[in-house]
Amino acid sequence: MITEETVICWSRDGALARISIHRPDKRNALATRHWAAIEAALDDIAASDAQIVVVSGVPGAFSAGADIDELGQLLTAPAAFAANNAQVQRTQLKLQRLPQTTLAVIDGACVGGGLGLALACDLRLASARSRFAITPAKLGLVYSADDSRRLVNTVGMARAREMLLTGRLLDAATALDWGLVNQLAGEDGIEALEQAQVQQLLATSGQARRAIKTVLGHLGGDASIDLAQADAAFNDAFSSTDFVEGAAAFLEKRAPRFS
C-alpha cells in the first residue's frame, strides 16, 4: 500500500511487514501528513497477522526529524502546531503499543522526531555512518513525557539528561555503547544485519513476543497496561498453543514450529 505520494509506504511479505519512508531530498524529514500516513499504516498492520514490522528510511537518512518548511508555517499557527504535536505523539505511541515486534533499521541521520520514531520500536539496528540526536533544547522546546520516558528506558537517566540538555550528536559507536541501538552493521551491510535479526525473531514464539511486550510495557511505565494485565500475560502463556509446541520441541530435541 502506498500513501502520501509514495513518501510513506507499507508492504507485507508473509510474516514481515515494512513501513518505508522515502523523501531523500528532505533527508526523510516528516511533516504532519507523513505522521498521519504512518499512523494509518500502523492501524492496517495491527489488524493483520504479520509478526515482525521493519521501519526503514533511505540510504543516508532514517529521518532528520521535523519538516523545516512546515515548521515555519506552524510557528504562526498555534492550533496547527498543537495538532501536529498530537499527531506525532499519537503515532509514536501507537507504534510503541503495536502488538507485533518492531525493528527500526537506521542508515544515516536519525534526529529529533526521527529518533523518537526509532525509540518507539522494540529494537534498533544501525549502520556505522548513522548519527543520532534529540535537539528540542536548541529550539527552546521540551521533549514530551512519553518521548523522554522511552529515551530514559533505553539509555538510562544520566545519558538521557546529557542528550536532552546538550542536544549532543552521537556517532554510531557511541549509540551502541549507550544502548541507543542494539547492533551495528558490519562489512556485510545493514540489509544483511536486518535479515539476520528478522530470522532470529521469527525463530521465537510470536505469542510469547506479544506477551513479553505487555509485561515490558507495564514495567516501562505505559499507563494503559496495569499489573493485572502483565500478570495475565505471564500466566496465560502456560496454556498457549505455542507453549505446547515449544515444550514438545524441547523434549523431542527439535526446532519448534510456532504458529
Image: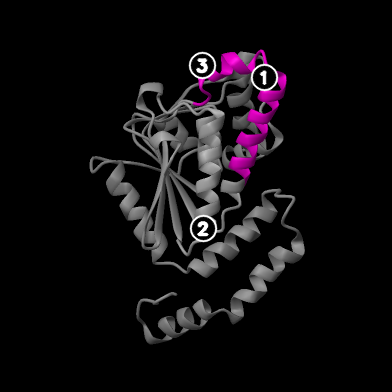
Mark 2–mark 1 Cα distance, whole angstroms, equals: 32 Å
- Horizontally, residue 15 falls left or right of residue 31, namely left
| 146, above or below 246, in the image | above
Residue numbers of the magenta segment: 65-93
User: Crowdedness of circle 1 by 10 Å Cα count: few (<14), some, many (20+)?
Assistant: few
Residue 54 is situated, as x and y percent measured from the top left of the image, at 42, 48
Amino acid carrying label 3: it is Asp
Element assignment for label 3 = helix
Q: Are marks 3 and 1 in contact (CB under 8 Å)?
A: no
Residue 232 is situated, as x and y percent measured from the top left of the image, at 70, 70
Q: What secondary structure is the magenta-colored segment mainly? A: helix
Tag 2 residue: 100
Residue 129 is situated, as x and y percent measured from the top left of the image, at 34, 29
Tag 1 residue: 141
Find out whether residue 151 is within the magenta segment: no
Tag 3 residue: 69
Q: Nearer the viewer, residue 107 or 91?
A: 91
Q: How is the image coloured?
A: one colour
Q: Is any atom of residue 243 visible in this view? A: yes
Q: Residue at x 49, y 67 (%)?
A: 206
Upstream in sequence: badge 3 or badge 1 = 3
Mark 2–mark 3 Cα distance, whole angstroms, equals: 34 Å
